[in-house]
Amino acid sequence: MKQKYIDYSKVQLFWLVALRVLIGWHFLYEGLTKLINPNWSSVGYLLDSEGFLREFYISLAGSPTSLAVVDFLNIYGLILIGLGLILGLFTRISTIAGILLLALYYLSHPPCVGFKYALPTEGSYLIVNKVLIEMVALAVIFVFPTGRKIGIDRLICRKNKND
Amino acid sequence: MMEDNNKNSDSSKGGIGRREVIKSLATIPVLGAFAYGWYKKRNYEKFLKESILENINLEAVNPVFERKVSNNKQIRLGIIGTGGRGRALLKGAGFLRPEIIDDWKKGASENETDHRYRDYLEQEDLNVIVNGLCDIYEGNADKGLRACANIYREGSDGKMGSKPKRYKTYTELLAADDIDAVIIATPDHWHGTISIAAARAGKHIYSEKPMTWSVDETYEVVKAVKENNVVFQLGHQNRELESYYKAREAIRKGIIGKVNLIEITTNRNSPTGAWVYDIPEDAGPDNIDWNQFIGPAPWHDFSLKRFFRWRCWWDYSTGLSGDLFTHDYDAMNQIFDLGIPHSAVASGGIYYYKDGRTVPDVLQMAYEYPERDLTLLYSASLASNKRRGRTIMGHDGYMEVGSNLKIFADSGSTKYREKIREGIIDPSVPVFSYTPGMKKVDAITSPTEQYFAGRGLLYTYRGGKRVDTTHLHIKDWLDAIRTGSQPSCNIDRGFEEAMTAHMGTIAYRENRKVFWDPDKQLII
């Protein structure tokens, strides 16, 4: 977990933190809307999957138990990652979890030639879609960490140092 | 703010200084902004929903069905006709050929989402037994017998019960005293004759639609059923669909205003859909009782095509009108209590399947209900899959009814004019949508949710419970027998269904406008 200290200019730090917070906002809102909608379920999304992991996603929808687990992890995963990114709390782990979650979304619905989805998309994509871009943006956040500069991690880090 | 904080990044190296805390908590105000935005958005959505629900005063709950207990007294069944539909009815009653179960088990082992076997095992045990079977083709009789013997719902390697007795004629079956009730799934031209005989023999009846093949026998069926006090159920399993109950409620509450036009359609485009069924290789005059097949129909020499594709000839069939229109008509009769129309006109022709058939493959029928100020329009094609659904059109809105229900406000509505102007109601989005099995009904739902709901994809696997409507319809009939009550599609509904279908058929075949005389109860 040893993090290399990077010195940012004020402008660099501002935009990196802004990117982190905005992605966090998006995660938090996605999670909360699912949480308050009693009819929300990932079943439709899972069944609509394409690509080489299609069978895996469909099998997740196959049993009520695995579906309940997927729904739970998805909702609370989104909320916690969102809070983590906004607050700069456990930023590294939140960023990694966010990248993983987005990778799972992307692999479930890769916008590749020949794949057709029932789920409507809000744009036109070829291989690159907004999920992939958000995932890469999180990768940038990961290699240019800001949680220990602007975020609760700064406080936690300092405490640990003092111990 | 962040840049301000940055200026003092090196201060307070020892304890936790004020600037240190500010830097640590600098992004917390974002959560405040989030919470404010969230609150505003939720309030706006709540306002929209409540504003719509003011007008769309529909209970946001699923209709409750009071299902009676099936399990108190065993009913002994006989089945007449075990072709495709007859065997589907047997499945609904809990009898399925072991080979099919083998297939389903195999399907389930290869694909986790294949729930046909599990759903079938979960289908309620109706506490019935089949004691007699009659079919005039050996192949169908054999399949039926094996289905009826499979009382434990097992595959080929499982334990079977004894096969029911096979009767060569329906009259012998009806004379049996170990049969309480019969399922009739013969070609159309036999429905009436057998129903009359069954009622006279004191057997309860589940008959496939249409109730009759000719006008005259329709009166006879009603008379025989009522005089002999048997429970009659007509095979319109749509009566069990929850969305139709919801649609009925919406109509009663006047949500779409005064209804002036109902459009129902059939859209099929495959040989099977057009009744061109496969003919089994082994079938021939030696294993088909042709004389009995002809029955009340005009004589024709033995023909495999006519036997297996009987729906294509008026001699045995009632065509689109009796075979497919009746389901949709009955659905609308269930929603509106339409009854028999004032008049009917029809047109169409044999435009695609020029295979020697006499029934049309494209048909339009228009029924008038002047007392209710509405037209019931039916349009069918057996050579196009363009889905047109069932639409009920009113001045204030329209409704699309299927296994789901969607209500839209009409852009020219008087009732919703203000709300449409204020942007509260969007005529292009349903103001109400109902998907059976959902935990609750929503006034507005997200586009994605709508999309899946429209395709019946949404709740198919949640809880994994899917129930066959045919099963429910048979259960409704058995429950009525056990409790001495009326089933959902009883003899009166059957009379209305048969007469309405016959009016359309006569209008088409005689190329004239046909009227119903409600006093004399006659088609004129």
Image (cartoon, coloured by chain):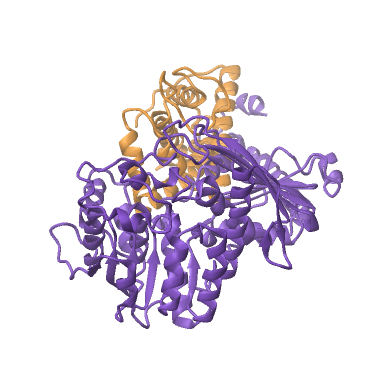
Residue under the image location 81 percent in, 41 percent down: B420
Q: Is residue A109 above or below residue B84?
A: above
Q: Is residue B491 above or below residue B226?
A: above
Give left or right: position of B331 versus B522: left
Residue under the image location 41 percent in, 58 percent down: B465
Residue under the image location 53 percent in, 39 percent down: B360
Q: Is residue A2 visible?
A: yes
Residue B356's spot in the image, x, y percent? Answer: 43, 35
Residue B71's spot in the image, x, y percent? Answer: 37, 79
Tell me, by letter, which chain the rendering colours orange.
A
Out of B499 and B106, give the one closest to the viewer.
B499
Determine the colour of chain B.
purple
In the picture, residue B152 is in which quadrant?
bottom left
Residue B326's spot in the image, x, y percent? Answer: 55, 53
Residue under the image location 42 percent in, 72 percent down: B197
Residue A155's spot in the image, x, y percent? Answer: 50, 39
The tally of labels here is 0
The N terminus of chain B, quarter of image: top right
The C terminus of chain B, quarter of image: bottom right
Out of B181 and A13, give the one closest to the viewer.
B181
Give left or right: position of B494 versus B166: right
In the picture, residue B388 is in which quadrant?
top right
Q: Is residue B135 above or below residue B453?
A: below
Q: Is residue B25 visible?
A: no
Out of B23 and A87, give the one closest to the viewer.
A87
